[in-house]
Image (cartoon, helix red, strand yellow):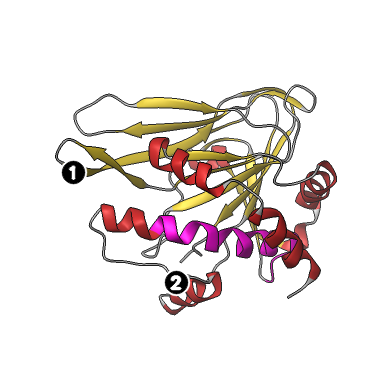
Amino acid sequence: MNNASNDFDTRIATSDWEAAATALDARGWAVLPGLLGAGECDALAARYDAAAEFRSRVTMARHGFGRGEYRYFAYPLPEPVGALRTALYPRLAPLANRWHARMGIDVRFPEKHAEFLARCHAAGQARPTPLLLNYGPGDYNCLHQDLYGEHVFPLQAAVLLSAPGADFTGGEFVLTEQRPRMQSRAAVVPLGKGDAVVCAVNARPVRGSRGDYRVTMRHGVSEVRSGQRRVLGVIFHDAA
């Protein structure tokens, strides 16, 4: 195991995962404060201009996704991105398995991320999904779900690499949930530079008077009013 992987393993182990799991069960999202340091954020944000590290670039307006753009990393992933993805997954897999059990979904997830990726790749989902997103004034991201294929890990993370109020204004991370026979409910997630939000990709279980039922989740970004906002997205399943 390399030094970056060891460092992330140690750092992630000190996060309050009991509180994170409680928050994820209660509302479908949780914040991991200070997951990355300021220097790490700046270094990752600067990678956006290193075109050789990416497999594709998406202009959101061209596809009706919003405004702004993002780039998907190519394999092999840069060391900080791959190490963070590998270190986060085993902390989330037990919760993912509990959610699937509560929602009556038979699929279970292995302990190690490499084993889950092998499952994705065997099914033709072999394109890496970690990405960097770049927003300027007037840019935004429509509410969406990052599904990409048959095999979907039900949780994902996004790390804010820019400082609210200093590097940009606006650009809040927004989630909505749709419960059966109810209007949608929105949440705005407070994030600082280096904070990560872990959230449901698609559906999560909610305890009702007659047992568990599924709630559909979507996420997006409100309009950036000024400056530049960059974000690392960590999705654990690969794309078809």
Marks 1 and 2, how far apart in space?
26 Å
Along the horizontal axis of the image, is 90 left or right of 96? right
Q: State which quadrant residue 123 falls in.
A: bottom left
What amino acid is at disc 2?
Pro
Which stretch did the figure color magenta? Answer: 76-96
Along the horizontal axis of the image, is 99 left or right of 145? left
Task: Determine the secondary structure under disc 2.
Answer: loop
Q: Which residue lies furthest to the left in this view?
A: 210
Q: In this view, does 106 lie above or below 119?
A: above
What amino acid is at disc 1?
Gly
The quadrant the N terminus occupies is: bottom right
Q: Which of 7 and 235 is in front in this view?
A: 7
Residue 71 in picture, x, y percent from top left: 65, 52
Q: Is residue 142 visible?
A: no
Q: Nearer the viewer, residue 79 or 147?
A: 79
Residue 10 in picture, x, y percent from top left: 71, 59
Task: Say which residue appears at 26% left-offset and 40% top-offset.
Answer: 207
Q: Of tags 1 and 2, which is closer to the observer?
A: 1
Residue 89 inside the magenta-drawn segment: yes
Q: Is the magenta stretch mostly helix, strand or loop?
A: helix
Residue 239 inside the magenta-drawn segment: no
Residue that label 1 marks: 211
Along the horizontal axis of the image, is 134 left or right of 125? right
Mark 1 or 2 closer to N-term? 2
Task: Say which residue appears at 59% left-offset and 24% top-offset.
Answer: 223
Residue that label 2 marks: 110
| Count of all numbered marks drawn on residues in the image | 2
Residue 56 in picture, x, y percent from top left: 63, 58
Task: Say which residue appears at 34% left-offset and 46% top-offset.
Answer: 203
